[in-house]
Amino acid sequence: MSHRRGPDAGFTLFELVVVVCVVSVMAYFLLDRMQGYKEGAEKASMQQTAAAIKSALQMRVAAYMIEGRDKQIEMLRLENPVGWLQEHPDNYAGEFYSDAYARVKPGSWYFDLSSREFIYVPRLSANFVPGPDGRKWVRYRVKIEYDEVQEKDAPPRKVLSAVNFLPVARFTWF
C-alpha cells in the first residue's frame, strides 16, 4: 500500500526551508532599506536644525540693523548659535574647548569654543562621505561678507553684503 498525499498534507521540509530562506532575504532587504530611511531622517533633522539657526541668525542681523547696532554684527562670528534659538536642540551636547569630536555622542551637535564652529556628528553614517579631513562630521560657521563701496569724494567704505550660516568643508551625505 502506498502513501499518497492528500490535499490537506503539509509542507515538505524542503519547501519549508525555501520559504524560510525567501522570507529571510526579504527581511534583510527591508531592514537595510529601513536603515537608509533612518539615516535620511537623521540628515533631514540635521539640515532642519541648521536652517533654524540660519533663520535665527538672519533675524538677529535684521534686529541689529534696525537698532543701528551694525558694528555688533561682526561679533556674531564668535557666538554660539544655539543662543539664538528659543530652545536648544534635544541633541545638543554643549560647548567644548579643543577637539571634542571623539567625546561627543554620535547624533549630537556641539559648539567648539576654540574654532567657533557648530558641529554635528552623525549617528548613522553609512552613506556619509567625509570632507578632506576624513572625519564624519559636519561643521558650520557664520560667514559675513562685505562689499567695498566707493562714493564720490569720499574714502572707500565697507558695506555689509551677506551674512550666512554655512558648512566649513564640503561633505556628501547620500
Image (tube, grey):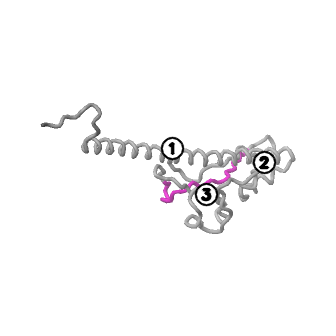
Q: Which residues are magenta?
A: 130-148
Distance between mark 3 and mark 1 Cα atoms:
19 Å
In the rendered image, the residue lying farthest to the top is 7
Q: Which mark is residue 15?
A: none
- Which residue does the numbered mark 2 point to in the structure image? 60
Work out whether residue 161 or residue 137 is closer to the camera in this orientation and state it. 137
How many numbered markers are drawn?
Answer: 3
**Residue flagged by tag 2: what amino acid is it?**
Arg
**Residue flagged by tag 1: what amino acid is it?**
Tyr
In the rendered image, the residue lying farthest to the front is 1
Instruction: Indicate which label's residue lies in the foreground, 3 or 2.
Output: 3
Q: State if disc 1 and disc 3 touch (CB < 8 Å).
A: no
In the rendered image, the residue lying farthest to the bottom is 98
Distance between mark 3 and mark 2 Cα atoms:
24 Å
Q: Is residue 87 placed above or below 55 in the rendered structure?
A: below
- Which residue does the numbered mark 1 point to in the structure image? 37
User: Which picture quadrant has residue 10?
Assistant: top left
Indicate the position of residue 93 as horizontal and vertical percent values. Answer: 65, 61
Residue at coordinates 44% horizontally, 46% vertically from top-left?
31
**Residue flagged by tag 3: what amino acid is it?**
Ser
- Which residue does the numbered mark 3 point to in the structure image? 108
